[in-house]
Amino acid sequence: EVQLLESGGGLVQPGGSLRLSCAASGFAFVNDGMSWVRQSPGKGLEWVAFISGRGDRTNYADSVKGRFTISKDNFKYTVDLQMSSLRADDTAVYYCAKTYDYVSGGYSDAWGQGTLVTVSS
Amino acid sequence: DIVMTQSPATLSVSPGETVTLSCRASQAIRADVAWYKQRPGQAPRLLVYAASSNVMGIPARFRGSGSGSDFTLTITSLQSDDFAVYFCQQYNRWPLTFGGGTKVEIK
């Protein structure tokens, strides 16, 4: 059974940094891409970042490019999202998602339960 | 970026009825569309990929269709667990984008 467990969320001040982590199990982690997708309170879904199975390709939403960095550890079965220069509009539940990699894009067939990030002074 | 527009925003229906959810892409995206269901307080769940392929375990009551720029998700014989928000997503090109969602609520 695929399991994804996010951690690292919390309250952070504007301009601050936070690192989210997602622990994966139940599938061949090195073969699958991973994404972070966020959802602001009461809003829709926004894809944030993607990393390929081997970690050699990444893609970012324009809204986070240059501020967020996604990384993958195929030995520890973890995928992280380093977030810096956080703004109020980064406040959201952040989901880790296993993502089929079609090079030009992909869909997510397994999701974690999410971790809440609140950016506020 | 490819904009995904879902309609209507809300559908009020009774259990046992059939609903059709629409999703339109701002440009042609072949059949590179996925549909997700999200219940309150839960993570999204993948229902359909490649516009019309059901994920294993998703009943045939959920039927996706379309290609190019117009897509639909039809749900027949609505059950209590089907009342949720449904999102479409394109994966034809980066950045991945989602529609704003359609809420299917009990009438």
Image (cartoon, rainbow, N blue to C red):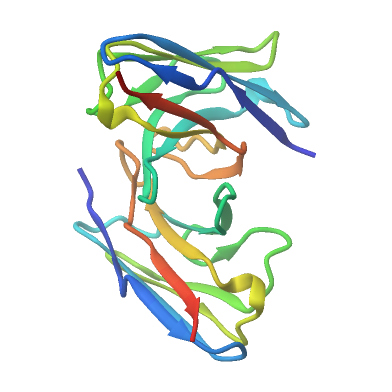
x then y, percent, for residue B20: 43, 81
Query: Count the marks: how many?
Result: 0
Asked where in the image residue A79 lies, by quadrant, the reply is: top right
Figure check: B18 above or below B59: below
Residue A54 or residue A93, whichever sits in front: A93
Is residue A104 something that shows in the picture?
no
In which quadrant will I find the N terminus of chain B? top left
x then y, percent, for residue B86: 46, 63
Considering every residue shown, the one lying at the far front of the view is A121
Tell me which residue sits at (43%, 69%) in the image: B103
In the figure, is residue B36 to the left or right of A49?
right
Figure check: B15 above or below B61: below
Figure check: A44 above or below A3: below
Tell me which residue sits at (65%, 80%) in the image: B79
x then y, percent, for residue A39: 41, 41
Figure check: A90 above or below B98: above
Residue A120 or residue A100, whichever sits in front: A120
Tell me which residue sits at (32%, 70%) in the image: B9
Asked where in the image residue A105 lies, by quadrant, the reply is: top left
In the figure, is residue B10 to the left or right of A52?
left
x then y, percent, for residue B81: 65, 71
Residue B49 or residue A4, whichever sits in front: A4
Tell me which residue sits at (25%, 13%) in the image: A66
Is residue B104 something that shows in the picture?
yes
